[in-house]
Image (spheres, rainbow, N blue to C red):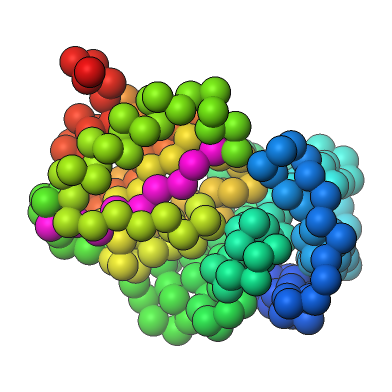
Amino acid sequence: MDLDHIRRTAVAAAQEGAAVLHSRLGRPSDIQKKSPTDLVTEADKASEKRIVAIIRSAFPDHGILAEESGMNGAATSAQWIVDPLDGTTNFAHELGVFSVSVAFRMDGDVAVGVVLDPMRGELFWSVTGEGAWLNNRRVSVSQTNSVADSLLVTGFPYNFKEDLDAIMLRFTNCLRAAQGMRRLGSAALDLCYVACGRFDGFWEQQLKAWDTAAALLIATEAGARITGFQNQPYMPGDRDLLATNGRIHREMISLMSLKGSA
């Protein structure tokens, strides 16, 4: 498998999807609701259609799992995972924090990941074993040694009311312990910002495979440690995700724990 060809196709697809989003940002959108808090716009659908077409033209025999259209093509060992617009709510409100995410996995393992921030022209990418990159610059996680000196980021699931007490308890634990906290609204960018050292740690729950597949590879190649909240191995689609620079991971695991919390 020519992973460089895969990478170039992923980049081209992400760029085309981003161009669609750029052209539609600030225009009236046909906004629909998957749930009371989960939005989808015509921009999501148009971006995904363009991305899928580019991948399909280059690799007609590959499977494609995309957020809006589901599984495209036959289930094969070669599969693409696409999020055409990560940060739909931001986009719908004309808040310029969103991304396009394209990943390729072979036999279940992600081998290529691309995350593009259309508003800043920042292209995060990685190929297994080749490190993590921001445009043409290699990046790595921060060297921060304690949560007290850390800038953390989190996100909230769409159905947050079902687990509100636990979510707010973890948020409060981290808010008290950290130097600072942020909430961007794009899990893919959150992970990429851990990868390049802008954030020291990120946690969220109930993320889907397309939210994280590309960015997880980028963060891992940058030196991040990625587990569930109980320090168990994490796979795309698992319920709980914790990503850190590694140096603060043990502290963060303790902050995720609800044992002994009032």
Q: Quadrant of the C terminus?
A: top left
Specify whether 153 is left or right of 97.
Answer: left
Q: Is residue 165 above or below residue 119?
A: above
Q: Residue at x 40, y 24 (%)?
A: 165
Residue located at (49% from left, 42% from top): 156
Query: Which of the image's four quarters has the N terminus?
Result: bottom right
Q: Which x, y percent locates residue 200?
A: 26, 56
Q: Position of residue 141 (x, y in %)?
A: 28, 62
Residue at x-position 56% and y-position 60%: 113
Q: Which residues are magenta?
A: 149-157
Residue 21 is inside the magenta segment? no
On screen, residue 152 versus residue 191, left or right, reads: left
Residue 232 placement: quadrant? top left
Q: Is residue 4 visible?
A: no
Residue 173 in sight from this viewpoint: yes
Question: Quarter of the image holding residue 229?
Answer: top left
Q: Position of residue 16 (x, y in %)?
A: 76, 76
User: x, y (%) of residue 92?
Assistant: 70, 63
Tally of numbered tags: 0
